[in-house]
Amino acid sequence: MNELKIIREYFKPIQPTVSVNNRDINYLEIQPNKEIENFIYCFWQLKTSKTLKKDYNYRVVSDGCIDIFFDHKQPSENFVMGFCRKYVQFPIGKEFDYIGIRFLPSAFPCLFGVNAKKLSNQCQELKKILPNFSEWINSEIKPVDSFESITKILNEKIIGFLKNENMHYDNRFLNSLNLIFLKNGCLNTEKDLNTGLGPRQLRRIFNFYIGTTAKSFSNVVRFQHILSAKPSKQSLKENKLYYDVGFFDQAHFIKNFKTFYGVTPSEAFR
């Protein structure tokens, strides 16, 4: 579906909270096959290289995506996490190995026909949402399999889903997404999204495909744009990036950023 290229072209969801200096925890991403790259942003693995001295709290920042993930050592433990309006913190112990699929915005409902609103702001057992897929993970993924070999299996499975589904997107919705991405989320969604969708239609279609309103999604796109700019603590003070993305003062920017990240910008970019 070529019309979905705009999502991958303009939106790069970042999860930056594992420090590259932390040698005891590894975070890896593998890109999907070309056939599904407009649906899957990446396959990811979060694992310890040795037992940690204390329990680890993994902080997931708001990225506008839906993820399926499972315990590599016990694949029957598989879950789906919907769109989150704020950061989420998971206590995951001293030793862990999780593998996940990060679906680009709107891809999960498109592939599986699941209303994204039902998943929003929560993590659920996958068997309650997609029982057949949950059972497939449990039966096909082995703890001895490498991350690389598992991504090949997952690629094939999702390519199969794509071939079996007759998908249709409302172009007015795609045009709305395109405008949000082009503006880096900095727009008035009530006035600027003149794509032929009335306010009620816009809310309904964004809730189904994204899991939230166009305004809330735009706020996450704006936050992710700030992350991708990789500002330093010093440049935030000097260049005042927050003015460029629609914040009127620093206090409002800091409060908004902390909602999505869990820490202040100066802590995140130090």
Image (cartoon, rainbow, N blue to C red):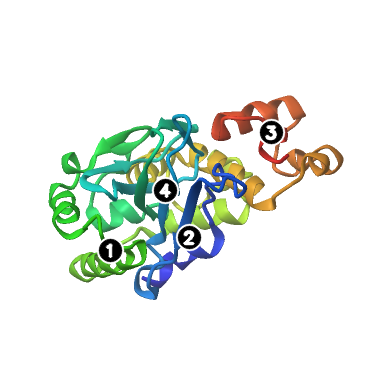
Q: Position of residue 133 (x, y in %)?
A: 18, 53
In what element is the residue under mark 4?
Answer: strand
The residue that label 4 is drawn on is 47
Q: Residues within 10 Å of mark 2 (few under 14, many from 20)?
A: many
Give amino acid for label 4. Answer: Lys
Ranked by sequence position, the earlier of labels 4 and 3 is 4
Which is more foreground, mark 4 or mark 2? 4
- Which labelled disc corresponds to residue 7? 2
Give the vertical position of 152 relative to 263 (above or below).
below
Give amino acid for label 3. Answer: Glu
Which is more foreground, mark 4 or mark 3? 4
Ranked by sequence position, the earlier of labels 1 and 3 is 1
Give amino acid for label 2. Answer: Ile
Ranked by sequence position, the earlier of labels 1 and 2 is 2
Give amino acid for label 1. Answer: Leu
The residue that label 3 is drawn on is 267
Image quadrant of residue 111?
A: bottom left
In what element is the residue under mark 2?
Answer: helix
The residue that label 1 is drawn on is 154
Which is more foreground, mark 1 or mark 2? 1
Q: Residues within 10 Å of mark 4 (few under 14, many from 20)?
A: some
Split into 4 quadrants, where in the image is the C terminus? top right
Q: Position of residue 7 (x, y in %)?
A: 48, 60
Ranked by sequence position, the earlier of labels 3 and 2 is 2
